[in-house]
Amino acid sequence: MAEQHTASPDDTGDAAIHVVAYFEVIPPSAPEAAVLLRQYSQASRTAAGLVDHEVLQQCARPDHFAIVETWQDQTSFEAHGSAAHTRAMHERLETLRCSPYDERLHHGFVLAAESASRPTGAIYAVTHADAIPPAKDDAMLCLKQLAEVSRHDEGNVRFEVLQQRSRLNHFTIVEIWRDQKALEVHVMAAHTRQFREQFQPMSGALY
């Protein structure tokens, strides 16, 4: 299991930009959107400054998508945003979407020291969690503990926590599991249930 790094929002040594974007498309357009996003992903993987890039399609609702990516710094992130293939993707996606393109920029809070390989059939879970502002520090402690313990769960490939740049009491949990069974065992684990009980009183929303 890779070691973790816990970063403060004021940690100037970490210039990486972690991006999480959510959007929905008109249900009949889901196959077309999937092809478009696959092409976009292939083009993005050659961009300078890219650290990690995933395009995700929800299992239960295939018209729901998420993009999770990490850029080396602000310059590479902005260059990618202005690239021809990125602009073309957004222009085409505009005709397919039925929700806004919700893009959120993050600091790394609890990160793996290195990226692990993704096994075939891996299951991704991306969860937004926010705490009421007075409980931010307690929420950070709970999330850090959850990540530390969950990384030792059988079948865990990646477990990271990102902190939103514009609202420091908002977080995104990014998980990768070997398969659906491993995720389900984690969901029912005592430490996962304990986290939910501890976090709920300080939660603005957990979904």
Image: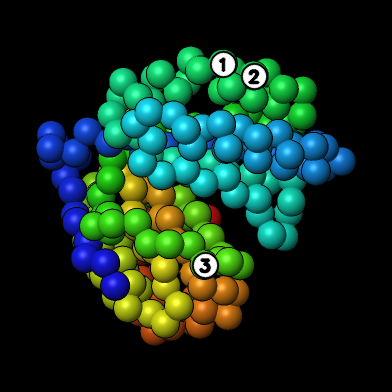
- Which residue bears the numbered disc 1? 84
Q: Position of residue 22 (x, y in %)?
A: 57, 39
The colour scheme used to paint the residues is: rainbow
Residue at image position (48%, 55%) is 127
Q: Give the residue at mark 3.
A: 119
Label 2 close to label 1 by CB (< 8 Å):
yes
Which is more N-terminal, label 1 or label 3? 1
Cα separation between marks 3 and 2: 30 Å
Q: For the residue marked with disc 2, what is the amino acid?
A: Ala
From this viewpoint, which residue is outermost toward the front?
46
Query: Image quadrant of residue 5?
Result: bottom left
Q: Amino acid at mark 3?
A: Pro
Q: What's under tag 1, amino acid-wise? A: Ala
Where does residue 106 sit, x and y in percent of width and height? 34, 38
Extreme-right residue of the structure: 28
Camera-side residue: 80 or 162? Answer: 80
Would you say 91 lies left or right of 103 here?
right
Query: Contact, CB < 8 Å: mark 3 with mark 1?
Result: no
Which label was assigned to residue 88?
2
